[in-house]
Image (tube, coloured by chain):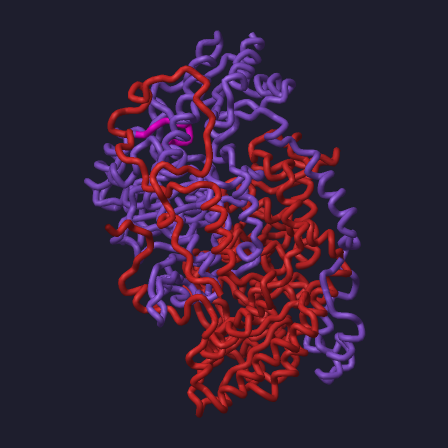
Chain colours: A red, B purple
Amino acid sequence: MRGPEPTIFELSAPGRAGMDLPELDVPALEVSDLVPEGMVRQAAPELPQVAEGDIVRHYTRLSNLNHGVDTGFYPLGSCTMKYNPKVNEDMARLPGFASSHPYQPEELSQGSLELMYELQRYLAEITGMDRITLQPAAGAHGEMTGILIVKAYHAHRGDKKRTKVIVPDSAHGTNPATAALCGFETVQVKSNERGGVDLEALKAAANEETAALMLTNPNTLGLFDENIKEIADIIHAAGGLVYYDGANANAIMGIARPGDMGFDVVHLNLHKTFSTPHGGGGPGSGPVGVKEFLAPYLPRPTVEKNYAGEFFLEFDKPHSIGKVRSFYGNFGVAVKAYTYIRAIGGEGLKEVSENAVLNANYLMAVLREHYYLPFDRYCKHEFIITPKNFKEQRVHTLDIAKRLLDFGYHPPTIYFPLIVEEAMMIEPTESESKETLDQFAQALIEIAGEIKENPQQVMDAPHTTVVSRLDEAAAARKPNVRWKKTS
Amino acid sequence: MNFIPNSTDQRQEMLQRIGAKSVGELFSDVPENVTLQRPLDIPAGLPEQQLVRHVRGLAGRNADLDAYLSFLGAGAYEHYIPSFVNQLLLRSEFYTAYTPYQPEISQGTLTAIYEFQTMVCELTGMDVANASMYDGASALAEAGLMACDSTRRNQVIVSQTIHPEHREVIRTYLYGRNVEILEIPYANGVTDLTTLEKLISSKTAAVLVQNPNFFGSIEDGASLARLAHAAGALFVVSVNPVSLGLLKAPGDYGADIVVGEGQPFGNPVSFGGPYLGFMACKEKYMRRMPGRIVGSTLDRNGKRAFVLTLQAREQHIRREKATSNICSNEALCAMAFTMHLSALGKEGIGKLSRLNLQKAHYAAERIAALPGFQLAFPVPYFNEFVIKTSLEPAKVNAELLKDRILGGLDLGRFFPELQNHMLFCVTETKSKSDIDRLVSRLEGLR
């Protein structure tokens, strides 16, 4: 493995530049005549001075310090790190998409609008909802959009007492954070011994103050909640709405639909389920789907089709929550999701979910003799194991995760969900072969052996990475979040 | 094509190991009454060859800025992006990675984001920047919320010279938290200081402005800052980063939080997204800032390394007490921003700003010299300007389209009082002959 790479600033030398700009070809005016004196910048920003070759080599080296899905297996639970088809990237870069301006006339944007319209139709079909917006830029942004729709719905009906959002104790951290961002209080309900929502606790929590329940199904334990209909009924009977967090939608496409389970609002993550890649932390896309009665509250504009078959943007939506982002969302990401869905087709989407679930259950079956399995039942697209059986050796989940790095794997999601001590949440996805799953299982089995024979080897990991076990406490105590020249 | 490698035999083998008879058995916990009993109504999959032909067909029905001469800006800006940026973004170690939770195998993304934060600080004159927000609009809205948290006040003042779509995003975000919004009108194309002085009070958490504003006009930053601070409010500025090679850093005229739309660097207009918002603030507000932040630290062998830091602000730790719910941001777009700015460098950014300024002024003055056209606001501007016409903007643009020119934005769409006003944008991508072509077409409309 290569050594650490300096920052681009440390490669800088006076007088270098990475691009030429055209010479001024219009008559030059005095800047002092155009900009008020108090608004003129006095010193140039300290940007690096580097040649094109320096930049290209720098970022190529940095890329070598990253692990992506294309580098190796990435079983990060709840993140659906599946293969990202290369054709997606090419399609999003077609000039008709990448070089089209959001304010160019609608008649000159018919291809983009048709793509958005059709993608919305596909996502509505997959989720069993009636209407979709592509405006939210990420999953959490979709959650915010969905919960604001819930808020607007209750407010429009004059139902002012609904100040609370219920989330199960297994929920993603974004759920309570979203509720707070939208001005709601969070009420937490506990899980039952099967890993689902405890119905008695839910009944006790649901009342005339309930605005919504936010739920992931399959949940963050990778388990399908068999009581889903009853759960939705309890909330609806109390006058609340039911929100579906689509982070785990890769398990159910073509098999079951949130709309048929009783959900009123859903969000999807195009960068997870629909392969648009994650980009190292975005851009994502978090479309939101609603049942017809919530359509008036969707963000504006919506994409519509008239009787002549022309597509247009509808801004006249008096009950809309407004906008959550400028323009129409992360359109380039929508192009990739559309490309993916058209490549795979309706039948293919079902095969995706079947194979995602098959892969997860297979890996779980191979690992069950070697690690502790907190919920022993068929999982969906992901499952949880823990090192509870290694308590004596004092090896923690973090150590196992770090040791996996030495084997060339990205570790699973760790210490989540919070209700399972020392959780390792493994999501293999459908795009991995049996051979890859076997090799990964073999690595975990080998690590289990090390824990018994030489636990220090695991506790000191990783041994082969460019850096190892960073001092995160120091980073937070004395934050250094920007480069500065040291003389 | 479903991108699934396992063969039927392998699947059978796997089922045996699981001890299940069929894949269907793995779904036995899905109740019958919620199981979809029919195939999804989505067309069958296409081989790549046909897929590409189909998607190209859709793209071909759009106008693109390579084929049209465009003077549209208004929040989505056409700039020349060097070829290498796109090639580096296609390094799949970057684009197929997740958020850098495991720093040992994510130093690439982490180092680049640290560089991004540094550049944002340099441009804006702030102490700290985050790893990016969804776009400029949501960054501005979150800055408003951040100011409310920092001041423990519940009202923000928003200038009407902020992009109308950004104001709408602010309203949506602040509706969630029940924050009061006061809008102040403009006078002569800039924020009306007199009204601001009247409306601002000890209830005001922040004054939000855009500079250069939606009309392209340069706001009086120092006076706005003075009024905000006199009331104990924070001064929040949204900037076009391209202007900052020439215009004063907002930190140097009193801004407390600076945000902006980062698209102009490294990111194509792409029908409105993906873009990136940037957000920076003074150090004392750092722990109230939303979003990811990358910090420098040492590893256990004393080597410098980068890591996500200050995570105690974030949703996965703090849950309902987090500063925001944001997690995924726009990392790859931020990387494009960083690469483009690396290419421009310390000298190039100034030159780029001046090119934009000069070309916009050349265009504005030539258009305003035509009969029936005049500059609407007598104030300094950067690379966008408002033209008042005696003709209907729709007609002007329809005529220009005949020559494959995308004219200025019809402002009547957002401002009822600005019927017959158009917002033009001229960046370094327009040559003198491009501008002359626009002018001669406009001249021919008389």
Of B208 and A289, nearer the camera is B208
Q: Which residues are magenta?
A: B212-219
Magenta stretch encompasses residue A178: no
Horizontal and vertical percent position of residue B399: 61, 16
Q: Residue at x 54, y 37 (%)?
A: B269
- The answer to whether A205 appears left or right of A264 in the picture is left
- The answer to whether A146 appears left or right of B402 in the picture is left
Specify the farthest residue to the left: B230
Magenta stretch encompasses residue B218: yes
Predominant SS along the magenta part: loop
- The answer to whether B446 appears left or right of B234 in the picture is right
Of A328 and A261, nearer the camera is A328
Dividing the picture into quarters, in which one does residue A316 lie? top right
Q: Is residue A372 above or below residue B138?
A: below
Horizontal and vertical percent position of residue A444: 56, 80
Horizontal and vertical percent position of residue A483: 32, 52
Q: Residue at x 56, y 52 (%)?
A: B91
Q: Is residue B405 above or below residue A185?
A: above
Horizontal and vertical percent position of residue A82: 63, 63
Q: Residue at x 70, y 52 (%)?
A: A122
Of B239 and B193, nearer the camera is B239
